[in-house]
Image (tube, rainbow, N blue to C red):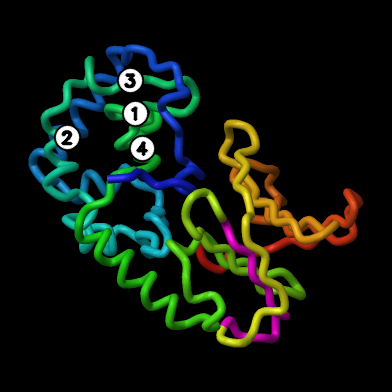
Amino acid sequence: MKTFKILLTILVFNSSFLIAQDLKPEYQKFISKFILEVKTGDKEAIAKRIKFPFKREYPIPSVKDKADFVKRYNQIFDKVLVEKITKSDPAKDWSEVGWRGIMLNRGDMWIDTDGRIISINHQSDEELKMKNELIAKQKNAVNNSLSKFKKPVAILETSKFRIRIDDLGNDNYRYASWSIKQEMTENPDLIIEKGVFVADGTGGNHYFDFKKGNFKYRCYFIVLGQKDSPPAVLTVYQSGKEILSQDAKIVSR
């Protein structure tokens, strides 16, 4: 199963580039406790380890709260993930990766040094089915010119624009924008393909660049920023000069 590429590239840690260290005894202790919680199916205890809302791969909705987690527990902790966890050895299969936290195997799951679950990069068959159904639904809810894509990435809104980014496959991203007053079923004012994804540092910040003629449209997603940082920013450049910059909220991701 392919791990989440973009959140989870957002907390998505590409483990092949990380230096893992043996787990300290004090961390092994709470990992052992977590393994026991999973083994006994203690949903209440596991829920206490999660900060809500807990993201799943878009367009699968985030887990809203404890009640939602308990309801969706078997969907997330399927037999495959449960087996990976319960058969794991804290000293051998879990490792500390600096400030990023503690990972299971090659990144199937991440837990911070306080025992909180950061991310689960495993997707069950049930979640995969849900994702495919939601993608199909989105394809029917956009203008026909945009109905072909591999998976949606995000929908942003600034004070003036509504922006949709889709993954067309093979590292090719598409940008579509409308006036904020328009719906996505209407013809977009602008469509740009062959966009690129760029990771900015190790904190999760990243952006997508889309070029058309001497214009460049950059959608920047802020994961690690200041307290007053917006979730995202749209910046437009003409011949390398910034001509527009607007804070954006993330409507869907």
In-image side of 31 versus 146 (left or right): left
Secondary element under disc 4, as helix, strand or loop, is: loop
As displayed, is residue 25 above or below residue 56? above
Segment tinted magenta in the rendering:
173-184
Q: Which residue does the image show at 63% across and 54% down from the upper left?
A: 195
Q: Which residue does the image show at 55% across and 83% down from the upper left?
A: 143
The residue that disc 1 covers is 103
Q: Which residue does the image show at 31% across and 15% down from the upper left?
A: 23
As displayed, is residue 188 above or below residue 128? below
Q: Earlier in the sequence, mark 3 or mark 2?
A: 2
The residue that disc 2 covers is 84
| Image depth: mark 4 or mark 1 in front | 1
Query: Label 3 vs label 1: CA separation?
Result: 6 Å
Q: How many marks?
A: 4
As displayed, is residue 132 above or below residue 141? above
**Tag 3: residue type?**
Ser
Query: Label 4 vs label 3: CA separation?
Result: 15 Å
**Tag 4: residue type?**
Arg
Q: Which residue does the image show at 19% across and 26% down from the upper left?
A: 32
The residue that disc 3 covers is 95
Q: Earlier in the sequence, mark 2 or mark 1?
A: 2
Q: Earlier in the sequence, mark 4 or mark 3?
A: 3
Q: Earlier in the sequence, mark 2 or mark 4?
A: 2
Query: Label 4 vs label 1: CA separation?
Result: 12 Å
